[in-house]
Image: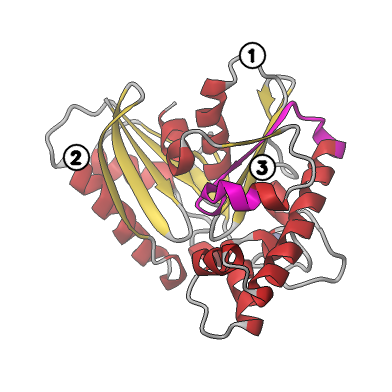
């Protein structure tokens, strides 16, 4: 069997997989803003707990937020959502600790690979993940698009508003600075200071609360801009929406103008784990 872990800005999730069956799962907070040591502590605790069961594991697949070099298994760049993660040698560290073959890739690319199981004949698919940050990956002509300017972080950091809000990457007006859970929560708090989470904002929106509606209509405007930009650039057959926030499918659908090519991640927030094991 295989052990897959998914390192996101909020949680580290892991599972033992027999084929595509989830045998056992584990989830802990990432503590991503506390720095490299804290993130490794979270990661090790998930892997240790899953290995403890004494199962035969043949591969450790790792999905991580940030710009990942999958050949060296190194995180080349991560935003402050994973503080100190830039330059981390994930493959080297995990192989030395667990004596298992380790494969590492970006979390959006892993999620895309997982979801492509349901689209075996598709050649052009873009996956977007909406969580603490915004990730994205594309399949073009049947190949995962990679490269300096195009990796799993690319769609989160395309400019949606010139001179707009400051992003976690330091630039202004990126998609992530409008479409992440973090961004939505801080926008919601401008009108609703007691707001605890993006999820609570969704609930208030469903209940018809005017300030929540205003915040989500603005979110929807930027979401539609991002979808249009992807259509113009990639001409995808499908745009798949995943990540924790996109599990509120009805809310997303109520905000999206052109739904013709939009679908939701079928593996939900397990897509990254499955992709990491593939
Ligand atoms: Zn950015």
Callout 1 crowding tier (Cα within 10 Å): few <14, some 14–19, many ≥20 = few
Q: Is residue 153 visible?
A: no
Q: Earlier in the sequence, mark 2 or mark 3?
A: 2
Where disc 3 sits, the SS reads loop
Where disc 2 sits, the SS reads helix
Question: Where residue 251 sits: x, y (%)?
Answer: 61, 53
Residue occupied by mark 2: 51
Q: Which quadrant is the N terminus positioned in?
A: top left
Q: Is residue 121 left or right of residue 44?
A: right
Q: Is residue 248 magenta?
A: yes
Residue located 33% across and 44% down the image: 14
Say if mark 3 contacts mark 1, CB within 8 Å: no
Q: Work out how far the residue at label 2 is from the one at label 3, CA to CA, in angstroms.
A: 31 Å
**Which portion, as a residue range, is magenta?**
232-252
Examine the image and state in which quarter residue 231 appears: top right
Q: Depth-wise, is mark 3 or mark 1 nearer the camera? A: 1
Q: Is residue 206 above or below residue 90?
A: below
Examine the image and state in which quarter residue 273 appears: top left
Seen from this angle, which residue lies furthest bottom? 193
Ligand 1 lies in which image quarter? Answer: bottom right
Seen from this angle, which residue lies furthest front? 208
Q: Earlier in the sequence, mark 2 or mark 1?
A: 2
Q: Which mark is residue 151?
A: 3
Say if mark 2 contacts mark 1, CB within 8 Å: no
Q: Work out how far the residue at label 2 is from the one at label 1, CA to CA, in angstroms.
A: 35 Å
Q: Is residue 160 left or right of residue 143?
A: right
Q: Is residue 205 magenta?
A: no
Out of 211 and 164, give the one closest to the viewer.
211
Out of 147 and 181, give the one closest to the viewer.
181
Q: Which mark is residue 121?
A: 1
Residue located 61% across and 66% down the image: 205
């Amino acid at each position: 069997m295989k052990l897959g872990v998914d390192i996101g800005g909020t949680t580290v999730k892991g599972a033992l997989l027999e084929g595509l069956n989830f045998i056992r799962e584990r989830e802990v907070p990432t503590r991503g803003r506390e720095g490299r040591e804290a993130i490794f502590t979270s990661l090790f605790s998930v892997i240790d707990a899953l290995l403890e069961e004494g199962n035969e594991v043949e591969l450790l697949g790792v999905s991580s937020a940030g710009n990942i070099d999958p050949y060296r298994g190194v995180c080349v760049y991560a935003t402050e959502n994973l503080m100190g993660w830039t330059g981390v040698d994930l493959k080297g560290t995990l192989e030395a600790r667990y004596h298992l073959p380790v494969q590492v890739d970006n979390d959006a690319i892993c999620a895309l690979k997982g979801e492509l199981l349901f689209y075996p004949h598709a050649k052009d698919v873009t996956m977007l993940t909406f969580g603490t940050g915004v990730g994205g990956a594309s399949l073009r002509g049947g190949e995962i698009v990679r490269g300096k300017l195009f990796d799993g972080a690319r769609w989160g950091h395309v400019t949606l508003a010139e001179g707009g809000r400051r992003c976690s990457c330091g630039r202004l007006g990126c998609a992530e600075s409008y479409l992440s859970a973090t961004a939505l929560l801080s926008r919601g708090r401008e009108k609703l200071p007691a707001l605890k989470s993006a999820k609570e904002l969704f609930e208030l929106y469903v209940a018809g609360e005017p300030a929540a509606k205003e915040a989500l209509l603005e979110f929807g405007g930027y979401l539609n801009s991002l979808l249009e930009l992807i259509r113009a650039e990639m001409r995808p057959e499908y745009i798949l929406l995943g990540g924790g926030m996109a599990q509120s499918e009805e809310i997303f659908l109520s905000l999206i103008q052109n739904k013709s090519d939009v679908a939701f991640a079928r593996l939900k927030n397990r897509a990254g784990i499955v992709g990491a094991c593939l």
